[in-house]
């Protein structure tokens, strides 16, 4: 992916994740604010994130963006497309807003819309799906407003902190662009 790519929204813009973004991503990802909403609870390291960017993002196996607030021109989080299945034309979407003061106001919705539209329009995907813990209604709403629809609730689908968690599966399809 061209490092100069910039995907513009009304409140945010996305740029491809680069090595120099590793420290910000790890700081966000390891914060209590973000970690409580993720399936994987193990802390990330800068070294591990650099390896991820080098081996996954820069090779195109994964598409990952840094989200910026347009008004303040600061990094606020990240979106990503993983489990890219070219044969079945689908991939999994995920996101995080790491700067708490930027939560709300439609930024998460724009992150979901811009990233999923990129997959559908530029990666030849037919479907973009995401998994969100049912006890995270703000993320579910952001994705729904970004064009995703609930496909189902999987009861006790993930074990998090020793407890079963229900997980919503949401999808956005090519024909709904």
Image (cartoon, rainbow, N blue to C red):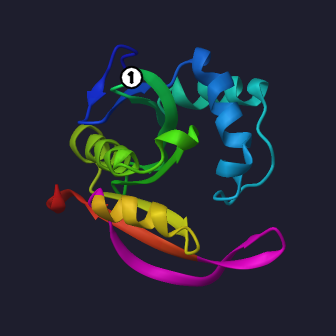
**Residue located 32% across and 45% down the image:** 110
**Residue located 80% across and 43% down the image:** 43
Q: Residue furthest bottom?
A: 155
Q: Residue furthest right?
A: 162
**Residue located 72% across and 55% down the image:** 40
Q: On the picture, is 132 further left or further right than 4?
A: right
| Residue 25 vertical placement versus 21 (above, below) | below
Q: Tell me where residue 79 appears, x and y as whole percent.
A: 47, 41
Residue 147 in magenta stretch:
yes
The magenta stretch is 146-166
Q: Tell me where residue 58 appears, x and y as whole percent.
A: 52, 23
Few, some or many residues within 10 Å of mark 1 (<14, 14–19, 20+): few
Q: On the picture, is 112 further left or further right than 10?
A: right
Under circle 1, the secondary element is loop
- The residue carrying mark 1 is 1
Quadrant in the picture for residue 118: top left
Q: Tell me where residue 142 appears, x and y as whole percent.
A: 38, 59
Q: Tell me where residue 100 appears, x and y as whole percent.
A: 57, 43
């Amino acid at each position: 992916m061209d490092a100069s790519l910039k995907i513009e929204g009304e409140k945010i813009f996305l740029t491809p994740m680069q090595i120099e973004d590793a420290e910000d991503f790890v700081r966000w990802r390891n914060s209590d604010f973000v970690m409580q909403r993720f399936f994987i609870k193990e802390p990330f390291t800068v070294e591990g994130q650099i390896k991820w960017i080098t081996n996954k993002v820069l090779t195109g196996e994964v598409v990952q963006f840094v989200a910026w607030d347009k008004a303040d021109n600061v990094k606020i989080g990240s979106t990503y497309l993983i489990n890219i299945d070219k044969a079945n034309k689908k991939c999994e979407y995920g996101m995080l807003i790491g700067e708490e003061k930027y939560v709300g106001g439609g930024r998460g919705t724009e992150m979901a819309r811009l990233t999923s539209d990129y997959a559908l329009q530029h990666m030849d995907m037919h479907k973009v799906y995401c998994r969100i813990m049912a006890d995270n209604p703000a993320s579910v709403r952001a994705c729904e407003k970004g064009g995703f629809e609930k496909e189902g609730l999987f009861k006790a689908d993930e074990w998090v902190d020793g407890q079963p968690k229900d997980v919503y599966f949401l999808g956005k399809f090519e024909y709904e662009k």
